[in-house]
Amino acid sequence: MPIEAIASTNVILEAQCKAATILYSTDSGKIIEIYPEIVVESLNDPLLKIYDVKKYNIVTPYVILPGLVDSHVHLNEPGRTDWEGFATGTQAACCGGVTTVVDMPLNAIPPTTTLANFNAKLNAAKDQLWCDVAFWGGMVPDNLEDLVPLVKAGVRGFKGFLIDSGVDEFPMVEQHYIEKAMNTLANHKTMMMFHAELQVDKHQHTIVDGRHIGLEKMNHNEDALTPEQRESLALSHVLSPAEPRSGKPSHIVHHDDAIVPALEAAAKIDDGLSKIDPCKYSSFLISRPDAFETDAISLLIKCLKNCMNSNNGKAPPLHIVHLASVEALPLIRSAHRDGLPITAETCFHYLCLAAENIPTKATYFKCCPPIRTEANRVGLWRALNEGLITSIVSDHSPCTPELKQLAEGDFFSAWGGIASVGLGLALLHTKASTIRPRASLIDIVKWCCENTAIQVGLQHRKGFIRVGHDADFVVFDPEREQLITDKRVFFKNKITAYNGFTAKGVVLSTHLRGMKIYDSENGFSQAPVGQTLLEARF
């Protein structure tokens, strides 16, 4: 059994950064020993001789940390491979220290909503994975009977939408489905996750009172919109889908001249929208008020309580994906006090970017929920520190340049989503030094490795540097700077909101089950060695 070792004075182990030597088998791909100091730099050292270590690498002063687990990535294969694919998406992941990604059930065609669709995805993934990949299933109105078979087939849990997803093959679900799904899954090891945006009727809720919509003036856009225009934006059913109503394979969308710009279509129903500039980010932000998130989370908590009351206190854990609004935090805090099994994630872009700095026509910043204000951004960091938000993910959601409407700059018609898989470690390390209290690499490991591994039920082998775990680790230079540019990213479509951003921190090498799959000098290994992760949740 060939044994190798790696050591540094800076290894992140069990919430500490300390000296350690890690011994691992390249046959089993497992960590077999962790020695709490750097052993003598010689293969003749007694410890190394006991294990017959064939290769020993000391990487001091660089940091060794666990491979990141990005639990929210859209790889889009099969079906929309001009947007992304298994090969390019996982390459982009591993060059940023990500050794495990969890693929979302949309925007692939078909989506991961039935066993047959899941098998089609697994077949498409063969021989293409540069890192390990697990999978989420999807919840749509007609697949209640498919949920348990998908659990048994290896999906980590399920994602659904409370608002129109924007793609025909993945329709939204409503309260009656949610409660039936919770009851169906209450006794299974799984998780239910939701895109938590919900558009309420004008008479159900006041969403334009400033407290919910956030009337802060954008530095770049003193828009002077009237209260009536703000209300029209927030209540428009044409503008409410999480994505523009394309719903077709992108090669059709690109050449469909009949598609009417979203705001123009909305203005045909409500004349109050006719004079709003679709190229100003603040107009788009007002169309997706904080109340979209707070009302969705309120409904989900209600469903969770109903399930627990019906099942002797049992319910599948509930997870809120890509939480963007700090106004939702009191709801989560209250749910925690009530002992409800609810967690939430946020994303790199909500922690690194702010609405005040988004230029006119810069549609590569569009996502749903939207990037909100600087004050909101700071509040999300505080929520991480408090433990209200437990994990950080990329929500890598790419598309083609045509769908981003880069030339038109129309925020309402552009596809939403920010491509960023593999960029998170450097981005978070850079921004963490600017907040108070300052977040450390130990914190980032907790949010991006440990807690995401726990979320997906893989904490027995991923997310931690521990004996018996997969030998997934990253060698990271926390001091070296890098310039992020569209030309230097590895995902398929070279569009990112971070073009021109100087980040502090560089991944020097990424190791998957003991194999070096990427290093910054020589690039990728000769062939992809990633596996699909289909075992039952821990």
Image (tube, helix red, strand yellow):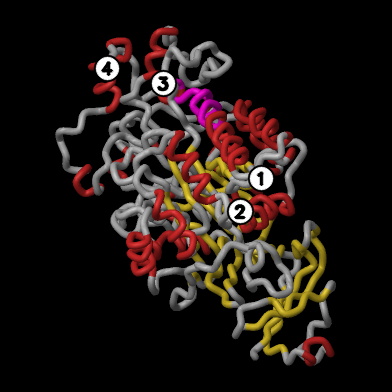
Quarter location, residue 75: bottom left
Question: Which is more toward the observer, 452 or 259?
Answer: 452
On the image, the x and y values in percent for residue 285 come to 46, 25
Is 66 colored magenta in this rendering?
A: no
Q: Residues within 10 Å of mark 2 (few under 14, many from 20)?
A: many
Residue at mark 2 = 455
Q: Quadrant of the N terminus?
A: bottom right
Residue at mark 1 = 390
Q: Secondary structure at mark 1?
A: loop
Residue at mark 3 = 283
Give the distance between the C-alpha atoms of the residues marked 1 and 2, in whole angstroms.
9 Å
The amino acid pointed to by label 2 is Gln
On the image, the x and y values in percent for residue 277 come to 34, 19
On the image, the x and y values in percent for residue 375 come to 63, 26
The amino acid pointed to by label 1 is Thr
Q: Secondary structure at mark 3?
A: helix
Mark linked to residue 267: 4
Marks 1 & 2, CB-CB < 8 Å contact: yes
Give the distance between the C-alpha atoms of the residues marked 3 and 1, in whole angstroms.
31 Å
The amino acid pointed to by label 4 is Ala
Quarter location, residue 27: bottom right
Marks 1 & 4, CB-CB < 8 Å contact: no
Q: Which residues are magenta?
A: 286-297
Q: Is residue 501 above or below residue 452?
A: above
User: Who's the residue at 41% across and 33% down the image?
Assistant: 163
Q: Residues within 10 Å of mark 1 (few under 14, many from 20)?
A: many
Question: Which is more toward the observer, 167 or 188?
Answer: 188
**What is the number of callouts on the image?**
4
